[in-house]
Amino acid sequence: MPAILDDISAEILDLKKQIGATILAHYYQDGDVQALADITGDSLKLAREATHVDSPVIVFCGVLFMAETAKMLNPAKTVLLPDLQAGCSLVDACPADKLDRYQEMLRINGRQFQTVCYINSSAKVKALSDWVVTSGNAEDVVRNKVPPGYEILFVPDKHLGRYLQEVTGREMILWDGSCMVHEIFSVGDLLKMKKQHPTAKTIAHPECPKNILDLADYVGGTEAMIKHVGGYAAPTTFLVATEPNMMWQLQQRFPQHTYLGVPGITCACNNCPHMARNTLEKIRDCMRTGRPEITWQPEFDKAKDVLARSLLNPPKSELVHPHGD
Ligand code: 13P
Ligand code: SF4
C-alpha cells in the first residue's frame, strides 16, 4: 500500500478507538477497505453481525441499502456511510410508488400473492413487502416461509427471481430490475476462458443472467462462494463471475488457488461503481465529522419489522426506534 494510504489507515484505526466504532465491510469493497474492517461479509452476514456490535458507532462500508438495514436493525446506534451516493442499480429499478400501484392492480384483479423483495431495495419497498431476502437466505424463505397457495411477486432482481423459480419450482411474477455489474459479464469471454483453462471451475452469483449461470459449475451468493471454494483442498483455478473485489477475500482465505475474474462486456475490471465510492479518505472523513449519518426515516418503522422477521433468527421481538413510539 502506498505510504499515504498507510497513514490514512493508521488514522482510521486511531479514530475507531476515539469514537467507539466498529467497521463493517462488504466483500465488494476494495481490498484496502476489507483489510481494515472488523467484520467482512455478505449482505446477510453483515445485517446479522450489525445486531451484535457493542460499540456506539457502526461505520458501514457498503452501499446505502446495507447501511439503512444496519440502522433499522440497530435504531439506537449511530450508523455512518462514507458516501451517501453509494447506491445500487437494483434499488433504482424499483420505485416504491410504482410497486404500490402494481400491487394494487394485482389486488383489484383478485390475485392472492405475497411480495418478496431482495434486500437490494429501498426501505419504502421493504415496507411494502412481506419478506426481505438476500442471496444467502432467499431459497429458504421462498421454500419455507411463503405459504403455499400464494403467488410470489419478486422484486427487483429478475435474474435472482428467475434462478429462484428454477431451483424452488415456485412460479413468480418478476420485476424488471437487474444489477448493472452482474448483468454484463461477457459470455464470449467466459467461453474463451473455459477453453484456455479446461479444468477450471466457474463460480457465479445468482444476480447473473441465465446465459452465465448455465455455464457455471457453482451458483451462490458471496458467502456461499467462500464456503464452496473452501471445500477444495488441491490448488484449483476458479473463474469468478461476481464483483472482482470478491477475489481479494478468496485470495486471503485460500491462497493456494488461482482466481481469474470474468470480464464485463464493456470493461475488463467490471467493478461496482457504487461500492467504489467508499474510499479510505471518505472512511476517515466520516469518522472525523460524524457525517454522513443514516437518519431514521418514517418508512423504517414498518420496514424494520419485515427485515427482522425475515433475516434474524430468532427475530428480535421488539426493535424500538429512537422516537420510542
Ligand atoms: P451478497 O453479498 O449478499 O451475495 O450480495 C451481492 C450484492 O450484489 C450486494 O450488492
Ligand atoms: Fe447493486 Fe450490483 Fe453494485 Fe451490488 S454489485 S451494489 S447489486 S449495483
Image (tube, rainbow, N blue to C red):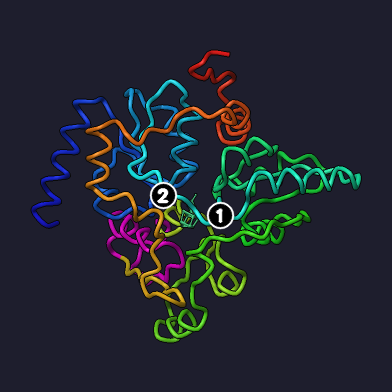
Task: Tell me, for residue 90, which label it has, or none.
Answer: 1
- Quarter that holds the N terminus: bottom left
Identify the magenta region. 230-256
The answer to whether mark 1 is within 8 Å of ligand 2 is: yes
Secondary structure beneath disc 2?
loop
Q: Nearer the viewer, residue 254 or 246?
A: 246
Q: Is residue 274 left or right of residue 131?
A: left
- Quarter that holds the C terminus: top right
* Three-letter code, disc 2: Ala
* Three-letter code, disc 1: Leu
Q: Residues within 10 Å of mark 1 (few under 14, many from 20)?
A: many
Q: Residues within 10 Å of mark 2 (few under 14, many from 20)?
A: some
Task: Tell me, for residue 86, which label it has, or none.
Answer: 2
What residue is shown at x 46% (from left), y 77% (from top)? 265
Q: Nearer the viewer, residue 118 or 292?
A: 292
Q: Residue furthest front?
A: 97
What residue is shown at x 35% (from left), y 39% (from top)? 24
235 is higher (above) or lower (below) than 93: below
The answer to whether mark 2 is within 8 Å of ligand 2 is: yes
Q: Nearer the viewer, residue 142 or 88?
A: 88
Figure quadrant of residue 150: top right
Image location of residue 31, percent across then percent down: 27, 55
Image location of residue 203, percent across then percent down: 48, 66
